[in-house]
Amino acid sequence: MTLSELSHDPLNFFWNALRTRGVRLVVYAIVVASLFPSSRFILLIAVILSLGIIWWREYRFKQDSKFLYLTVFVVFLVIGYIAAFINVSNIDELRLGMSPWGNGILQVPDGKYSGVGQGYRGPIKLEVQVKNHRIVDLKTLDYPDLISVLDNQIRLFKKQLLEEGRLFVPGQPEMLRGAQETLTGYVNAIQDALSKGIPAFPQYNWFSRLFLECFIGKAPDRVTLNALAILFAVFMVFEYAFQSMLIPGTGRSINCYNCASCVGVCPVKEVEGVQMPMGLVLLTRLGNYERVMELSKYCVGCGRCAAKCPIGNSGPLVISAAFQAAKEQKRSTSTENKRDTA
Ligand code: SF4
Ligand code: SF4
């Protein structure tokens, strides 16, 4: 598996790479990073840099034009970023003069308007009803931060807002985790809704909206560290389960408690830094069949380990499973290659 395979046959490259645990962990990290807008930007930079390095070498030696396409894409991205930045600054300045805050409600005609604001755990969606230039009703359409204590803050602010009839800056919320973000998201949703009622309210252009959506704020849902930890645990459980290799023809999978009972009775005990046969079990489960085959010559086949292992593993059994798995792996790779060349 070489880097040049990546540019010639990326699908096959990734499929083969996924057989390695390290690569699977990297893929997991990439999936998690893509959940956050700011880390998505870092990911994009990392992908561009990696492809840039690979394609630059191909361009130097084979005059391959992929590097030139990538350069054009990067130039487009930089120009787009500058354009989006200018557009957002200009529009924000214009918006200041037409804000729906306070007496700005006088610009909003009667009607119902819906808006979105980013809360602590995701977007807060609501509907605002305006009558005679006063806010007369507020309906929450979607509110992922619905935790009783935070909800009290919102209820209090809503009561004050309906009494005032216009948007004002709320007081400091209680010192609760997420309370400030929730209240800010709620207020932003009202502002967003009222802005839609103001005729000719300045809007960002499509590119700026896309850029903001993808890379700046407005995460679709805030992924908490707890959720990430749970995701990671689930991933590891599956990863571990996948590693317990089935022994062909027996329906049995190779597991190990790492109790080292087998090491204690093995006359070989340790070779080349690998404890026998416990290390062989681990290597087999990690898919490193080549190494198991190399080390198999040290096993004298005495069978002492089989008598000690609580789950019935033995050096010869693991070695034969690794040989069979390597053979099957080779067969499936050559079938894939034949299919590709056909
Ligand atoms: S069968 Fe092999 S691994 Fe098991 S105790 Fe004997 S020498 Fe060690
Ligand atoms: S005795 Fe069995 S379970 Fe214990 S370390 Fe050896 S192979 Fe694993």
Image: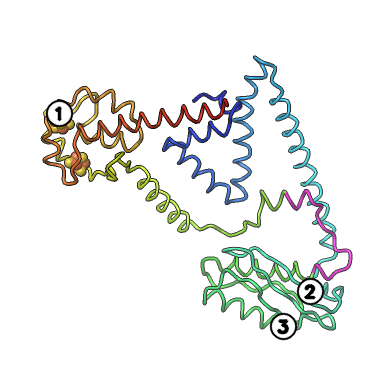
Mark 3 vs mark 2: give the one in front: 3
Disc 1 CB within 8 Å of nearest ligand 1 atom: yes
Give the residue type that dot 3 points to: Leu
- Magenta part of the chain: 195-210
Q: Residue furthest top?
A: 61
* Label 3 – label 1 distance at C-alpha: 83 Å
Mark 1 vs mark 2: give the one in front: 1
Q: Does the CB distance between marks 1 and 2 fall below 8 Å?
A: no
First in sequence: mark 3 vs mark 2: 2
Which residue lies at the image location 19% right of the left edge and 23% below the top edge?
Answer: 298
Which residue lies at the image location 89% right of the left edge and 64% below the top edge?
Answer: 200
- The residue indicated by pointer 2 is 102
165 or 250, which lies in front? 250
Q: Could you tell me which secondary element the residue under label 2 belongs to?
A: helix
Whether the magenta-drawn stretch holds residue 141 is answered as no
First in sequence: mark 3 vs mark 1: 3
Residue 333 % position (x, y):
46, 29
Give the residue type that dot 1 points to: Gly
Q: Does the CB distance between marks 3 and 2 fall below 8 Å?
A: no
Q: Does the CB distance between marks 3 and 1 fall below 8 Å?
A: no
* Label 1 – label 2 distance at C-alpha: 86 Å
Image-based side of 325 in relation to 110, left or right: left
- The residue indicated by pointer 3 is 162
Give the residue type that dot 2 points to: Gly
